[in-house]
């Protein structure tokens, strides 16, 4: 997914006026949440009656959209202007910016901890700790995914006003405030509302990632570096569920989830505070720089 995400985000953002990059970034990232939402709906209404095979085929259908994009959508002016001739030249360009690339990999690793640490095991947490029925858990997941879509768009647009990093930290502040209710809530209503708000913050921060990574990437490798950093982030954050299970067995499920995210958010705030951004940078010679840092 990461490679296609990098190329697709670059293509869309390079076609977009500078002032709309933030909100488009949120909309692009919402595609992930929309897929998660459709999966939750299918799990609630399709899986019980039709089985996993129908889930498989329904999940494969959106991939056909890639064929249309590949054949009908033209390359951007920025790609034509800055394209690199060979794969070797592309990787040499990445190597020439290794410090920036390492920073993006670090950022993406902890962003993966943030998202997967709040999503993957939360349904199991509801079932195991609070003994909530599977059908009800599906409804909670649908609700929190709607929150994710809302958050990505709101904070993506906010990043046009106050900057990429400050918007991401503002979104994570929302998640930080709701953690006590999200991890220690005593009723289904509290847990459901907290999950909804938690994902507003989590995916609010994620909604800025497509534009932030593309603005931070060198022109010649804008289609490669964001997706490559994304993939390395997935690789390094792969043990997320294993770590949370380890913590669960020692300090309990609630503290495992809460503690993991407290540390993750703390590290992300430090990484973002020490980092930089290039909000509104030109992607090609025809861009108008409406805003600068």
Image (cartoon, rainbow, N blue to C red):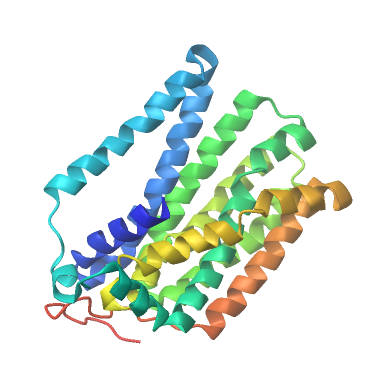
Q: Nearer the viewer, residue 106 or 291?
A: 106
Dividing the picture into quarters, in which one does residue 140 lie? Answer: top right
* Quadrant, the C terminus: bottom left
Residue occupying the point 13% across, 81% down: 285
- Residue 142, x across and y down, in percent: 51, 36
Query: Farthest right residue?
Result: 250
Residue 279 or residue 98, whichever sits in front = 98
Q: Is residue 169 left or right of residue 288?
A: right
Where is residue 265? Give x, y as percent: 63, 67
Residue 49, percent from left and from top: 51, 12
Total marks shown come to: 0
Of residues 220 and 177, the one nearer the viewer is 220
Residue 31: horizontal and vertical position, in percent? 37, 47
Compared across the picture, whether 153 is left or right of 168 comes to: left
The reply to whether residue 206 is in sight is yes
Q: Residue at x 39, y 66 (%)?
A: 226
Please give left or right for residue 189 compared with residue 292 in the image: right
| Rendered position, 151 above or below 125 | below
């Amino acid at each position: 997914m990461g490679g296609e995400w990098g190329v697709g985000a670059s293509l869309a953002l390079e076609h977009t006026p500078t002032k709309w990059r933030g909100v488009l970034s949120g909309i692009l990232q919402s595609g992930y949440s929309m897929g998660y939402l459709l999966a939750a709906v299918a799990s609630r209404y399709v899986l019980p009656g039709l089985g996993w095979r129908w889930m498989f085929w329904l999940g494969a259908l959106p991939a056909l959209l890639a064929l249309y994009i590949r054949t009908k959508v033209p390359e951007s002016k920025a790609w034509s202007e800055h394209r690199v001739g060979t794969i070797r030249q592309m990787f040499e360009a990445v190597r020439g910016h290794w410090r920036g690339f390492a920073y993006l990999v670090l950022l993406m690793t902890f962003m993966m901890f943030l998202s997967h640490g709040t999503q993957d095991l939360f349904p199991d947490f509801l079932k195991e700790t609070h003994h909530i029925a599977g059908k009800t858990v599906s409804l909670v997941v649908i609700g929190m995914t709607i929150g994710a879509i809302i958050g990505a768009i709101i904070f993506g647009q906010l990043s046009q006003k106050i900057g990429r990093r400050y918007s991401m930290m503002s979104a994570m502040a929302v998640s930080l405030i709701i953690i006590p209710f999200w991890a220690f809530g005593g009723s289904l209503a509290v847990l459901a509302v907290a999950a909804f708000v938690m994902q507003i913050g989590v995916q609010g921060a994620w909604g800025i990632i497509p534009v932030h990574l593309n603005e931070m990437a060198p022109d010649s490798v804008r289609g490669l570096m964001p997706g490559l950093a994304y993939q390395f982030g997935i690789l390094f954050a792969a043990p997320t569920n294993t770590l949370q299970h380890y913590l669960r067995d020692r300090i309990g499920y609630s503290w495992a989830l809460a503690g993991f995210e407290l540390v993750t958010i703390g590290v992300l705030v430090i990484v973002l505070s020490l980092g930089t951004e290039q909000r509104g940078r030109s992607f090609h010679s025809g861009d108008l720089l409406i805003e600068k840092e």
